[in-house]
């Protein structure tokens, strides 16, 4: 991987491993092995003496290292607390954050923002973060750690913790992170993979297709009573776990092989439609498990529009619920119409392993 590379020049006369006479035991026969160098950032570094692509001369701040960098550079950030905000972005810059590297903004501003991108004329900006860094805007509920607005911005973020993401027109991916705080998207596309999305306020301001917002192998956790995910606009969920998540839906959404686990006296999925826009809800191979309130509904739809006849499509295939046989897993309200178990929504006394 690019973040493990270091430039090493192997001498032509280096003897092979295990002996001094060449042979087939690892001799390089005059080969020069070249790995890319990188720039280092350390809390014990010095911005005055730090040097680009010389890890022996680390910078003290991330900002100074980025300012000195060139497109395609690799910057490694060692453990420590870095209080830096509105950091600039350069095209195709790659940053690796070691475990224990924590970055926070000292003001009501994002940590990274492409408002501060250093513009050139070479097309898309591929901005990459890898490792186990933490990006925290603690106590700033509406201030996201990352803000991406440019049409040409493609951000790929791997992290241990991310406090908020705002996307406007850009493309972003977040993986392996605990995600909290706030997520908002106006146009653009976003993908979350292998994330724990915990007590996050997710709001979308533009109508989307299922391709614009995707969650794969994610776990949604709601610890308080307020919903942590209000999926008003289109999104796709695959192999996700939803714990105590009350979902309000007002546009197309698909859940594929997902588990819904609730210990609250509330439906797993609650749909309150108050517009004339048609909505398609797709549930394929999902499991709905009620813990403390076994008779609670898995899916409730309430039509709040006037008139109460709108283009609402439910595509339910291969789902199961542990609602007792006397219960009703799905309810249509206004007018209140109960749907009993069918081959596409079975009742079972299964338990969550």
Image (cartoon, helix red, strand yellow):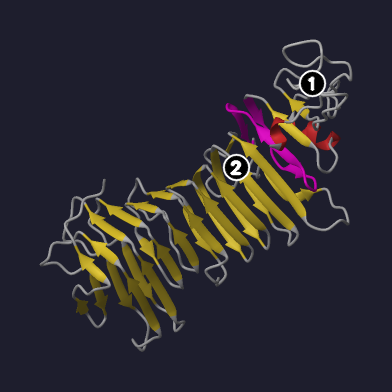
Q: Mark 2 points at which residue?
A: 158
Determine if the magenta segment contains residue 93: yes
Evaluate whether residue 6 shows in this view.
yes
Q: Name the residue under label 1.
A: 27
Is 2 on the left-hand or right-hand side of 122?
A: left
Query: Compared to 301, does 14 lie above or below?
Result: above
> Between tags 1 and 2, which lies in front?
1
Determine if the magenta segment contains residue 33: no
> Residue drawn at (14%, 67%), measured in percent from left and top?
327
Evaluate whether residue 84 shows in this view.
no
Q: Quadrant location of residue 310?
A: bottom left
Quadrant showing the C terminus = top left
The residues colored magenta run 80-105
> Residue drawn at (25%, 70%), measured in percent from left and top?
345
Q: Where is residue 154 in the image (x, y as percent from the top left)?
A: 70, 54
Is 72 on the left-hand or right-hand side of 223?
A: right
Query: Compared to 8, does 169 lie above or below?
Result: below
Disc 1 crowd, CA 10 A, few/some/many (<14, 14-19, 20+):
some
Q: Quadrant location of residue 319?
A: bottom left
Q: How many labels does the image show?
A: 2
Q: Position of residue 217 (x, y in %)?
A: 45, 51
Q: What element carries label 2?
A: strand
Query: Compared to 155, does 105 lie above or below?
Result: above
Disc 2 crowd, CA 10 A, few/some/many (<14, 14-19, 20+):
many
- State the residue lying farthest toward the top: 20
Circle number at residue 339: none
């Amino acid at each position: 991987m690019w973040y493990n590379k270091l430039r090493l020049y192997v001498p032509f006369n280096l003897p092979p491993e295990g002996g001094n006479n060449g042979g087939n035991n690892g001799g390089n026969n005059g080969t020069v092995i070249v790995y890319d160098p990188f720039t280092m950032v350390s809390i014990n570094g010095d911005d005055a003496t730090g040097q680009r692509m010389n890890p022996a001369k680390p910078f003290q701040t991330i900002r100074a290292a980025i300012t000195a960098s060139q497109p395609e550079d690799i910057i490694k950030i060692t453990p420590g607390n870095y209080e830096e905000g509105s950091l600039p972005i350069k095209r195709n810059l790659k940053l690796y954050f070691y475990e224990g590297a924590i970055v926070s903004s000292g003001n009501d501003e994002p940590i990274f923002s492409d408002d501060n991108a250093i513009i050139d004329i070479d097309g898309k900006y591929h901005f990459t973060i890898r490792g186990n860094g933490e990006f925290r805007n603690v106590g700033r509920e509406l201030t996201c750690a990352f803000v991406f607005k440019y049409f040409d911005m493609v951000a790929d973020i791997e992290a241990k913790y991310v406090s908020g993401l705002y996307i406007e027109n850009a493309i972003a991916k977040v993986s392996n992170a605990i995600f909290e705080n706030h997520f908002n998207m106006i146009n653009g596309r976003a993908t979350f993979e292998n994330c724990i999305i915990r007590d996050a306020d997710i709001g979308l301001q533009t109508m989307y297709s299922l391709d614009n917002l995707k969650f794969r192998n994610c776990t949604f956790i709601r610890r308080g009573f307020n919903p942590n995910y209000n999926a008003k606009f289109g999104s796709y969920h695959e192999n996700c776990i939803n714990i105590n998540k009350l979902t309000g839906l007002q546009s197309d959404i698909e859940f594929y092989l997902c588990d819904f686990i609730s210990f609250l006296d509330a439906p797993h999925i609650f749909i309150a439609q108050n517009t004339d826009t048609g909505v398609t809800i797709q549930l394929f191979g999902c499991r709905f498990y009620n813990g403390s309130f076994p008779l609670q509904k898995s899916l409730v739809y309430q039509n709040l529009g006037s008139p109460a006849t709108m283009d609402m499509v439910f595509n339910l295939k291969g789902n199961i619920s542990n609602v007792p046989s006397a219960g009703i897993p799905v309810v249509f309200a206004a007018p209140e119409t109960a749907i009993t178990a069918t081959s596409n929504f079975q009742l079972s006394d299964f338990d969550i392993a």
